[in-house]
Image (spheres, rainbow, N blue to C red):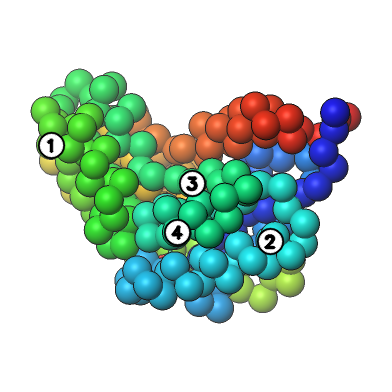
């Protein structure tokens, strides 16, 4: 059995392209549709009800394009809206994202981990439940990094079809300065795991790793989310045959 319908992805902007990229590498036969809601970006400081409304609109557009599954490629939208989306579309499988606090806490040797995310993600039930369950014995430094979202959105401004564009791999000295100002204090505070809890941040992974210089591991969830999406497609018999 083969299901040729596309897999849908949405994010508040271009952050989720990192997830899309990982998924395309893992499942090159799948067709994909990506919605970057950049005109409403950032979601990070919006009220939860507004994020639910925008997420529902993005989902409706993806389903209107015939998508067989929706990947909510945004931690903030997942935190605010995934329960609503699953309840509203019971026949559609959804894959969401939450900061990888569990592996970070389990692997930390210093007992200190830093999570970079939006305020909306930190306010959400998923993050707080996971933290209470798996990170009660470690110190979690929760850090909002909205300036990183802006940097990444600016890098794609004017690009007509971001999902078809090459992802930026190198960044200038000004970006390096901003990233260093955010990351250096976390490493100096003893964090040996830096969790990228917002899908815009893997775009800056190379710069963040350069600042960490081997002192902390950067945890990027993109590959794990892509594998989870593939697993769900396989379980439901929705994979597209080569
Ligand atoms: N990409 C979104 C996330 O993963 C956040 C960016 C925003 O504030 O809109 O949380």
At which x and y percent is residue 64? 74, 65
The residue that appears at 77% across and 57% down in the rendered structure is 66
Residue indicated by mark 1: 139
Residue indicated by mark 2: 62
Q: Which of the pair 32/189 is nearer the observer?
A: 32
How far apart are labels 4 and 3 at the CA level?
12 Å
**Mark closer to the chain start, 3 or 1:** 3
Residue indicated by mark 3: 96
The quarter of the image that holds ligand 1 is bottom left
Residue indicated by mark 4: 84
Q: Is mark 3 within 8 Å of ligand 1?
A: no
Q: Choose mark 1 or mark 2, whichever is in front.
A: 2
Residue 194 in sight: yes
Q: Choose mark 4 or mark 3, whichever is in front.
A: 4
Labels 4 & 1 near each other (Cβ < 8 A): no
How far apart are labels 3 and 2 at the CA level?
15 Å
Q: Secondary structure beneath disc 3? A: loop
Q: Is mark 4 within 8 Å of ligand 1?
A: no
At which x and y percent is residue 163? 70, 57
**Mark closer to the chain start, 1 or 2:** 2
**Mark closer to the chain start, 2 or 4:** 2
Q: Is residue 230 left or right of residue 45?
A: right
Q: Is residue 21 left or right of residue 160?
A: left
At which x and y percent is residue 11? 54, 60
Give the crowd class for mark 1: few <14, some 14-19, many >=20 residues within 10 Å. Answer: some
User: Residue reaching furthest right?
Assistant: 242
How far apart are labels 1 and 2 at the CA level?
39 Å
How far apart are labels 4 and 1 at the CA level?
31 Å
How far apart are labels 2 and 4 at the CA level?
16 Å
Q: Secondary structure beneath disc 2? A: helix
In the displayed structure, 143 sits above or below 115; it is below
């Amino acid at each position: 059995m083969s299901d040729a319908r596309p897999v849908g992805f949405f994010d508040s902007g271009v952050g989720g392209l990192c997830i899309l990229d990982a998924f395309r590498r893992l499942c090159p036969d799948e067709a994909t549709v990506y919605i970057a809601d950049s005109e409403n970006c950032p979601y990070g400081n919006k009220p939860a009800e507004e994020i639910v409304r925008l997420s529902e609109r993005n989902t409706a557009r993806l389903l209107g394009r015939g998508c067989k599954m929706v990947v909510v490629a945004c931690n903030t939208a997942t935190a605010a809206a995934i329960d609503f989306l699953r309840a509203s579309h019971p026949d559609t499988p959804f894959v969401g994202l939450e900061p990888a606090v569990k592996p970070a806490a389990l692997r930390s040797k210093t007992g200190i981990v830093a999570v970079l995310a939006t305020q909306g993600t930190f306010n959400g039930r998923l993050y707080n439940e996971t933290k209470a369950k798996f990170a009660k014995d470690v110190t979690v430094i929760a850090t909002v990094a909205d300036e990183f979202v802006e940097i990444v959105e600016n890098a794609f401004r004017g690009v007509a079809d971001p999902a078809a564009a090459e992802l930026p791999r190198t960044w200038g000295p000004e970006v390096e300065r901003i990233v260093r100002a955010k990351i250096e204090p976390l490493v100096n505070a003893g964090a040996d795991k830096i969790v990228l809890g917002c899908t815009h941040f893997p775009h800056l992974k190379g710069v963040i790793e350069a600042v960490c210089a081997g002192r902390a591991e950067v945890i990027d969830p993109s590959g794990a989310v892509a594998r989870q999406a593939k697993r769900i497609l396989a379980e439901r018999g929705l994979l597209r045959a080569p």
